[in-house]
Image (tube, rainbow, N blue to C red):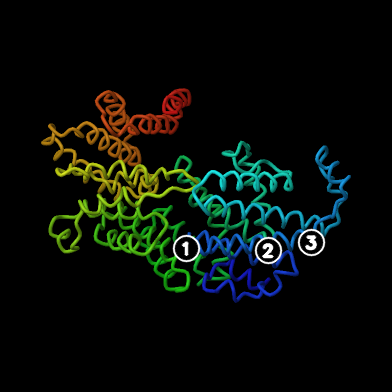
């Protein structure tokens, strides 16, 4: 198990097939779960079909291994369990462990089933596996989209309790909490992250594994969320240098470095990492190509020529690169495809500050807003574009672009503490709703930003009203 711990401390430089857990995965439910988890993580990192298939087949074997340690029930007992749940008191300690290992294997196999192929059969299969896993766990439901509900605070409390221990679960709980604080709460929430807790969770591992790839990655990510972009850039470079086997970790670093330089409006460096992602990573070619083209739009003409890139040709590639997972389109890819359509005709209509619009899509203004100097620089860029746009009144996208700039301008002003001016910018967008032709997202998102603005000023009722209107 020490090899698994090393892996979870995420040097990410060990080949899973060579780990100590592999030979014992047929005889031990713990080794079976550990080995299959490694291959599932590999599949999740690469999204390669062969890795997904390997993860699924290994997880099937792990389920068989775990099954041997589960309590054997007679036909009568099985029928009885359908009516009333099996009591924990009826299980030995080993059998309880086997139930948990079996449930965890089912859950991971379900996750791979979702991405294995884009058809409803696999979606339903995955849902049934999760349902079975849930019945074993007897805890709050895991995924709301299958009809389950959940309690975030209770879940976080359980994770904190797990992270405070010294078992293998501790490190898994720690990394889950770090993902929550550094990504989930930012992207799916209001943009506020508990960095104090993230720091305290990471510090012991940073002391013990100062050169661990994932440790350095999270340290750099926390630096970004604090606004320490220059320090974060150094740490991401250290993370890249720490190992060469897992290129996917490099791609995560490239993504973060691209945004670091975007926040600083260092467009050539941002382009460098966007270019690497578009060439090397398979996660979302549509987003990477769109992002690359969006950054190129920000370059002066002379710098653009030096890159040798064709912006129009890049935008025209985006639609053909979109993908579907479990039969569903990815929202950010759909957004990129819609925006790129302005370049589909023989007479393209250029996008206005697309890199900054994408920064908003990924909630980047909440991050760059930690730095007043960089936020001021963004405001200057937006106001320059605002002036230039006054000469484009005949453009069919004119009001869409005006409103998009007002939204971005309002965000900068909000983070600079100029709340009354921010409110005026947001109000201009909502008042122009009937004049917006294509970017229908602008009004509801602006209503949401107004709600957050009023929340910031302790105007609770007003905040709720605007957020409800956005909803």
The residue at which mark 1 appears reads as 217
Element at label 1: helix
**Residue placed at 43% from the left, 47% from the top?**
324
Instruction: Decide which of tag 1 and tag 2 comes sooner along the chain.
Output: 2
| Number of numbered callouts drawn | 3
Q: Cβ–Cβ below 8 Å for labels 3 and 1?
A: no
Looking at the image, which is closer to me, 101 or 64?
A: 64
**Residue reaching furthest left?**
391
Element at label 3: helix
Quadrant assignment, res 37:
bottom right
Instruction: Decide which of tag 3 and tag 1 comes sooner along the chain.
Output: 3
Foreground tag (1 vs 2): 2
The residue at which mark 3 appears reads as 68
Left or right placement of residue 371 versus residue 395 in this view: right
Give residue 369's mark: none
Question: Which image quarter is the N terminus in?
Answer: bottom right
The residue at which mark 2 appears reads as 61
> Disc 1 and disc 2: Cα gap in Å?
32 Å
Q: Circle 1: is it few (<14), some (14-19), or many (20+) Cα within 10 Å?
A: many
Q: Where's residue 261, x and y in %?
A: 31, 58
Left or right placement of residue 117 versus residue 1 in this view: left
Q: Where's residue 289, x and y in %?
A: 30, 55
């Amino acid at each position: 198990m020490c090899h698994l711990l090393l892996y979870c401390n995420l040097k990410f430089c060990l080949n899973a097939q060579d780990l100590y857990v592999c030979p014992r995965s047929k005889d031990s439910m713990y080794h079976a779960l550990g080995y299959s988890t490694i291959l599932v993580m590999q599949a999740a990192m690469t999204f390669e079909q062969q890795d997904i298939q390997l993860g699924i087949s290994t997880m099937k074997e792990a389920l068989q291994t775990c099954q041997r340690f589960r309590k054997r029930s007679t036909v009568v007992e099985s029928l009885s369990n359908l009516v009333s749940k099996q009591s924990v008191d009826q299980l030995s300690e080993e059998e309880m462990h086997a139930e948990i290992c079996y449930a965890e294997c089912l859950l991971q196999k379900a996750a791979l089933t979702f991405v294995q192929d884009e058809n409803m059969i696999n979606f339903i299969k995955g849902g049934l596996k999760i349902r079975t896993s849930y019945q074993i766990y007897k805890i709050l439901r895991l995924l709301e989209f299958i009809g389950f509900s959940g309690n975030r605070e209770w879940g976080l409390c359980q994770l904190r309790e797990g992270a405070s221990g010294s078992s293998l679960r501790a490190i898994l709980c720690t990394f889950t909490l770090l993902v929550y604080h550094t990504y989930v709460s930012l992207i799916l929430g209001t943009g506020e992250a508990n960095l104090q807790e993230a720091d305290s969770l990471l510090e012991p591992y940073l002391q013990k594994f100062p050169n661990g790839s994932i440790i350095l990655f999270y340290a750099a990510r926390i630096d970004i969320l604090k606004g320490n972009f220059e320090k974060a850039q150094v740490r991401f470079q250290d993370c890249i240098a720490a190992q060469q086997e897992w290129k996917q970790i490099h791609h995560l670093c490239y993504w973060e470095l691209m945004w670091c330089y975007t926040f600083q409006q260092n467009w050539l460096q941002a382009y460098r990492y966007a270019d690497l992602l578009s060439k090397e990573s398979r996660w979302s070619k549509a987003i990477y190509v769109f992002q690359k083209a969006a950054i190129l739009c920000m370059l002066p003409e002379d710098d653009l020529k030096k890159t040798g890139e064709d912006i129009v040709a890049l935008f025209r590639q985006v639609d053909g690169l979109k993908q579907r997972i479990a039969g569903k389109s990815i929202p950010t890819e759909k957004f990129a495809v819609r925006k790129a359509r302005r370049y589909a005709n023989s007479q393209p209509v250029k996008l206005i500050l697309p890199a900054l619009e994408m920064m908003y899509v990924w909630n980047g203004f909440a991050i760059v807003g930690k730095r007043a100097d960089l936020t001021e620089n963004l405001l200057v860029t937006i106001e320059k574009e605002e002036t230039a746009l006054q000469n484009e009144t005949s453009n069919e996208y004119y009001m869409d672009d005006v409103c998009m700039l007002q939204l971005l301008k309002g965000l900068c002003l909000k983070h600079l503490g100029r709340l009354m001016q921010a409110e005026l910018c947001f109000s201009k967008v909502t008042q122009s709703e009937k004049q917006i032709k294509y970017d229908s997202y602008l009004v509801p998102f602006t209503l949401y930003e107004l709600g957050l603005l009023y929340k910031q000023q302790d105007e609770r009722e007003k905040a709720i009203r605007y957020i409800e209107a956005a909803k």
